[in-house]
Structures are given as C-alpha cells and as structure tokens.
Image (cartoon, grey):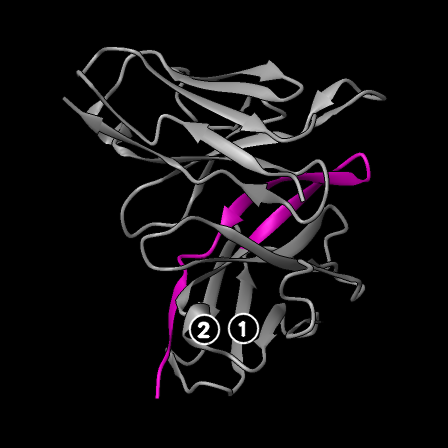
Amino acid sequence: QLQLQESGPGLVKPSETLSLTCTVSGGSISNSSYYWGWVRQPPGKGLEYIGNIYYSGSTYYTPSLKSRVTISVDTSKNQFSLQLRSVTAADTAVYYCARVRITATVYDAFDIWGQGTVVIVSS
Amino acid sequence: DIVMTQSPDSLTVSLGERATINCKSSQSVLYNSNNKNYLAWYQQKPGQPPKLLIYWASTRESGVPDRFSGSGSGTDFTLTISSLQAEDVAVYYCQQYYSAPFTFGPGTKVDIK
C-alpha cells in the first residue's frame, strides 16, 4: 500500500524559504505511471495546485507561483521536495503531497494523498 | 486557467436521501480524441486529506461505495450521493485535469439534516 508523508518545519518567517519533503513508501517514485505533486489549502479555504514533478526531473509549476517555487526529486531516497521562496502570511496553509496518475500518456486524477503538514508563516 | 464553480455552497440532507452537487467549468474539459472528460471529484472530511471518489467524470475509484456516482460532459457535471450516510458528511470538490494548472472548485459542504 503506497503511502506519502510530508515533513518539514511548521513555522517559517516572512521572506524566508519554505522547504518540505514528501517521502514515498510502499512503492517506487521512479514508476513511470505517475507524476508527484504538491497541493496546498489555506485555513478554511479550498485547494490550490502548486505543481508536479516526474521521476526524470521534469516539472510543471502553476504560473501564479512559478517565480517562487522549485520542486525536485531524489529517486535514491524515494522523496520529492518543495521549496517556496520569499514567503508571506498568504502562504500559510496545509501542504499536501499527492500522486498523480498518468493514463495513456496524459494526466489523470490525484489518487493518493499525504496527510498534510501545516505551515505557518509568521515572525 | 480553467475556472471551476460549484453549487450549492452547502446542502443539508436527511439520512438516506439523495444529495446532488453541481460543478461547472469555464471551458470544456472533454477531450474529443478519446471522448473523456478530464474531471474528478474528491471528498474531504475534517482534518483529513482529500480522497479521490470519481475520475473521468463518471468512473468510481476502487473501494468507493456505489452510492456515489458522477455524470455530465463538457462543462457541466454532477456528483450524486444516492442515499446519504452519516459518514458522507464532508466537503466535496471537483477538479479539472484537462489543462494545467489543474484547478479545483471551491467546494460544497454536505451535512445531515
């Protein structure tokens, strides 16, 4: 049973960099049938897609965050990571990592999610 | 970006009754070459991550009870819970994966009357 687990600091100061890691267990991050993505949810609000990465390292970032986001993958550790630079209070959210299915070479739904990790941006 | 809207914002339904949630996309999410609608539905209970219920607009994810069904095509979609159970209290989101950035609807909160 594949599982995802987010980890990282729960408190980040304004203007600094938010760094989170998602560890994949029970399966390989190098499986060619999946992308690996990040989604966030501000308190009491809806879901916002941040971006995704393939095991080869190819990435997609949502345009509104593209200038501040880097997603990377470490296949040797079965992990992928999120960095969000120059954070403000508006980046306070629960951050989820998720597995994104690929069906016939196209994107499919987000079928497995981590439990999420709360990140608060505050001095 | 494709904008997703949902209605109603919330609904209260008696146990055993039908719950219907609507989702509309600002442009079609039907890919003509394979006749698939790139639309998913998720359920999120308090303090939990979203759970995939339906993909390709109408395909139930493995393990999802058959009281959940999805329908619609193009820009208009519906999630139906045929007989609401207590454990179905949650917020439900639709999502398009037709074009990046993949966008979610604002959510519909379902509660018991």
Find disc 1 in the rendering and name its residue.
A21
The chain containing the residue under callout 2 comes to A
Taking B11 as reference, is A38 left or right?
Answer: right
- Quadrant where the C terminus of chain A lies? bottom left
Circle 1 packing at 10 Å, graded few (<14), some (14-19), many (20+), is many
Closer to us: A113 or B110: B110
Instruction: Give the answer, above or below, for where B74 lies relative to B96.
Output: above
Closer to us: A55 or B95: B95
The location of residue B83, given as percent across then percent down, is: 28, 12
The number of callouts visible is 2
What is the quadrant of residue B66 in the picture?
top left
Taking B34 as reference, is A72 left or right?
Answer: left
The chain containing the residue under callout 1 comes to A
Q: Which residue occupies 62% across, 69% down?
A: A80
SS state under label 1:
strand
Find disc 2 in the rendering and name its residue.
A7
Q: Residue furthest left?
A: B113
Q: Which residue occupies 52% across, 47% down?
A: A112
The amino acid pointed to by label 1 is Thr
Disc 2 from disc 1: Cα separation = 5 Å
The amino acid pointed to by label 2 is Ser
Q: Could you tell me if the residues under marks 2 and 1 are in contact, i.e. CB atoms within 8 Å? A: yes
What is the quadrant of residue A54 in the picture?
bottom right
Taking A116 as reference, is B36 left or right?
Answer: right
- Which residues fall within the magenta stretch? A98-123
Q: Residue furthest right?
A: B33
